[in-house]
Amino acid sequence: MVFIKLFISIFSIIQFSSTSFSDTGNRSIHNFSISKKILSKIHEEHPITFYCQCRYDVKKPNWKSCGYIPKKDKKRASRIEWEHILPASHFGVNFNTWKKGHPKCKNKKGKNYKGRKCTEKINIKYRKMQADLYNLQPVIGEVNGLRSNYQIALIKGEKRDFGECDIEIKNKKFEPSENIRGDIARTYMYMEINYPKYIQFNENIKKLITKWDEIDPVDKWECERSKKIEKYQGNFNNILKERCNKKLNDKLKFNKKESFVQNKEELDKVLKKNIKLNNNKGFFKGKGSKDALK
């Protein structure tokens, strides 16, 4: 009887743990359109496109601010779009409805359809993943279109197809600029940890994002943005929370050390001054000294 109770207790703990870890990620937003409205508000204080670092006003990018030159689609290059850093197809394809469709996925003519449209209609988990704010960034529409769902990679050469915008797209691969590689890596890590049933990267991608995370650490906006998203979405970004806390602690340690050094320097100055005064004639030497009354 005791053994049975113990077994039930252990099973309950395991079951609870499993539920806790599997029920992560976006908890409250089920609609991609709502995500875009929320992010538009969040980014009002940081209106800069993710890939090309262009400033933008509401929905229109300022090409001159970053030296952007449209490659072929000026109309789409004139608007801001919200890009899935980890393309939606990379996790959507792991839902049955993406490949096989569903009986409820029929158009007005009664023809069956599948893919993203069907998966979005049928599966609430996919809708939450698609709407996850941590995986969305503002980009120039043309770049979003040409990046497509291509996987990140390192590409030989530095060919520029968009003026001064430091990105390369070649052979269905996408190379971002060095200053955002860490941001992308940590987004990939977050998505894999929070949606393990649908996202599993191969070893090459894991090595790449591990390296990018190391060489391009978190910055101020990345951490601030994460805090703002947490308030809307209901879950914190476990990857960014760890990195941002470490950066804050390192900064505090540095400030304490710098303060100590500054205080030590001030103390040394005082000591040197006192030593100099001690050597001057007329300095008070103590009771009974002839110099005491001078």
Image (cartoon, rainbow, N blue to C red):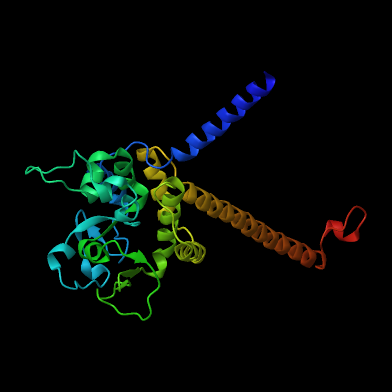
What residue is drawn where x is 22% and y is 45%? Answer: 118
User: Would you place residue 255 above or below residue 36 in this image?
Assistant: below
Outermost residue toward the top in this view = 1
**Res 40 visible:** no
User: Would you place residue 74 above or below residue 114 in this image?
Assistant: below
Residue 73 pos. (x, y %): 15, 68
**Res 257 visible:** yes
Q: Quadrant of residue 8?
A: top right
Nearer to the camera, 194 or 116: 116
Q: Is residue 277 left or right of residue 176?
A: right
What residue is drawn where x is 25% and y is 62%? Answer: 144
Q: Quadrant of residue 279?
A: bottom right
Residue 180 pos. (x, y %): 39, 64
Outermost residue toward the left in this view = 109
Residue 176 pos. (x, y %): 36, 68
Quarter containing the C terminus: bottom right
What residue is drawn where x is 31% and y is 56%? Answer: 87
What residue is drawn where x is 25% and y is 45%? Answer: 119
Residue 245 pos. (x, y %): 53, 49
User: Would you place residue 101 above or below residue 216 in this image?
Assistant: above
Quarter containing the N terminus: top right
Q: Is residue 294 left or right of residue 212?
A: right
Q: Is residue 62 left or right of residue 152?
A: left
The total of numbered circles placed on residues is: 0
Nearer to the camera, 146 or 34: 146
Nearer to the camera, 190 or 215: 190
Q: Quadrant of residue 61?
A: bottom left
